[in-house]
Amino acid sequence: MAAEIAEEFTTNGEPNRTLPVDWNIKPTQDIYIIKSHERNLEVVSWGLIAPWSKDGEAALRSQSQAINARSETVFEKPTFRNAFHKKRCLIPASGYYEWATEFGELKSKQPVYISRQDSHLLAFAGIFDTWRSPEGVERRSAAILTCDAVGKLAKVHNRMPVFLPRDLWDSWLDPDLIESKPLIELVNSREDDSALQFWPVRPLVNSIKNHGAKLIEPLETGDPETLF
């Protein structure tokens, strides 16, 4: 996966460590991010640790509740605002899951796998930060920006990640860009859903014990467990 990310995003150097391919990443688990103009590839944990966390237990608890940051309020929320202005990143993924709610034709809570039609990696707009424990141990963590779902994805769920087009990557990673207005304009210039595809999958993904490519296999046509 690291080699695929390096090729897709023209990253610089090797990551601080490599991660195994995983089809069922859970909050607080390690993920890759791409940061800075140099496009350095690093490993952090998923879910932004609140800067005021007093110990490891509090840090873990806070990040499990902050895997996503709403793009409409990220610039003002205490947990996210410093990272939004000063520590932005790209979060690569081959795809992600969403659970159908009351929107559209899918039954409620039906797991759905979403990816690009052209097999390229997705580029989520992300933010990251570094938290230091009382013992002096540093932990980096990151969150994904989300926005209102548009187009066909609105039939699945009312929210979606902020997908950044390639021509905005450098601007998003620019550490000198710190003002809210141009940053919000970047977020609002996000990609729509036209390059995406999705299909319902079996509920295996609902358990973090399950892994492997079988998790993204489409449900059989006519399966009574889906209205898709």
Image: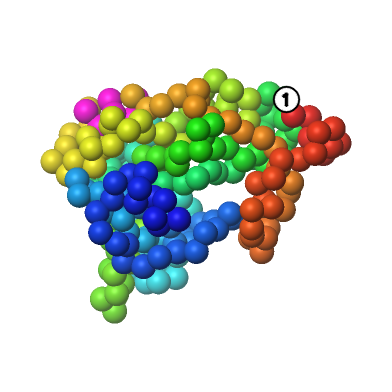
* Residue 78 can be seen, yes or no: no
Image quadrant where one finds the C terminus: top right
> Eyeballing the image, is 59 above or below 147?
below
Span of residues in magenta: 182-188
Q: Position of residue 147 (x, y in %)?
A: 45, 31
Classify residue 58 as left or right of residue 176. Answer: right
Marker count (numbered): 1
Frontmost residue, 21 versus 50: 21
Image quadrant where one finds the N terminus: bottom left
Q: Position of residue 194 (x, y in %)?
A: 50, 23
Q: Residue at label 1? A: 105
Classify residue 92 as left or right of residue 200. Answer: left
Task: Please name the amino acid that badge 1 sits on.
Answer: Glu
Q: Residue furthest left?
A: 176
Q: Position of residue 107 (x, y in %)?
A: 75, 33
Classify residue 51 as left or right of residue 4. Answer: left
Quarter of the image for residue 189 reads top left
At horizontal 68% and vertical 23% (from top left) the residue drawn is: 104
Q: Position of residue 143 (x, y in %)?
A: 40, 49
